Amino acid sequence: AREGAPGVAAPAADNDGELPSSGGPGLYWSDLAVSTRDWGATGRRRLLRPSSGHVPSGKICGVVGPSGAGKSTLLSALAGTTAAAAGSDVRVDGAVWMTANGEGAEDGEEEG
């Protein structure tokens, strides 16, 4: 994790020493970023730099970082209560949870 960015504690490996592969049970996110309109020169302000991670089903994970690092923004984006930037991908047990434009997936939509 970059200095000042939230970090996600790595989950412990299963008994066989391997983590589940992508698409297995769990929460996955890749290139998850959040920006907001800013009336400054750039027009956008980045609240959360692109991040990727995985939490296997049934595991507990901690998000740590200094004040203002983006911990709450990360969790809000994962929950779908904050719109993620284009290119973000969040999946639960292999099924699409959120599309790149921050909209929730249709019920039962699966990865293609």
Image (cartoon, helix red, strand yellow):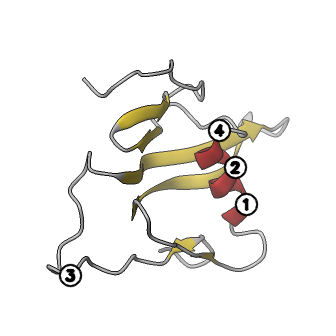
Q: Indicate which label's residue lies in the foreground, 2 or 3.
A: 3
Rendered view: 107 above or below 58: above
Task: Name, please, the residue furthest toward the right.
Answer: 39
> In this figure, which residue is indicated by the disc labeled 4?
80
How far separated are the C-alphas under marks 1 and 4?
12 Å
- x, y percent for residue 15: 20, 81
**Label 1 with label 4: CB-CB less than 8 Å:** no
Task: Name, please, the residue furthest toward the left.
Answer: 16
Q: Indicate which label's residue lies in the foreground, 3 or 1.
A: 3
Q: Indicate the amino acid at tag 1.
A: Ser
Q: Which of disc 3 and disc 2 is earlier in sequence?
A: 3
Q: Residue at x 82, y 40 (%)?
A: 40
Q: Indicate the amino acid at tag 2.
A: Ser
Q: Which of disc 4 and disc 1 is earlier in sequence?
A: 1
Task: Name, please, the residue furthest toward the top.
Answer: 106
Q: Residue 72 carries which label?
A: 1
Bin the neighbour count of mark 2 within 10 Å (Cα to Cα): few under 14, some 14-19, many 20 and up: some
Q: Is mark 4 on a helix, strand or loop?
A: loop
> In this figure, which residue is indicated by the disc labeled 2?
76
How far separated are the C-alphas under marks 2 and 1?
6 Å
How far separated are the C-alphas under marks 4 and 2?
6 Å
Q: Indicate the amino acid at tag 3.
A: Asn
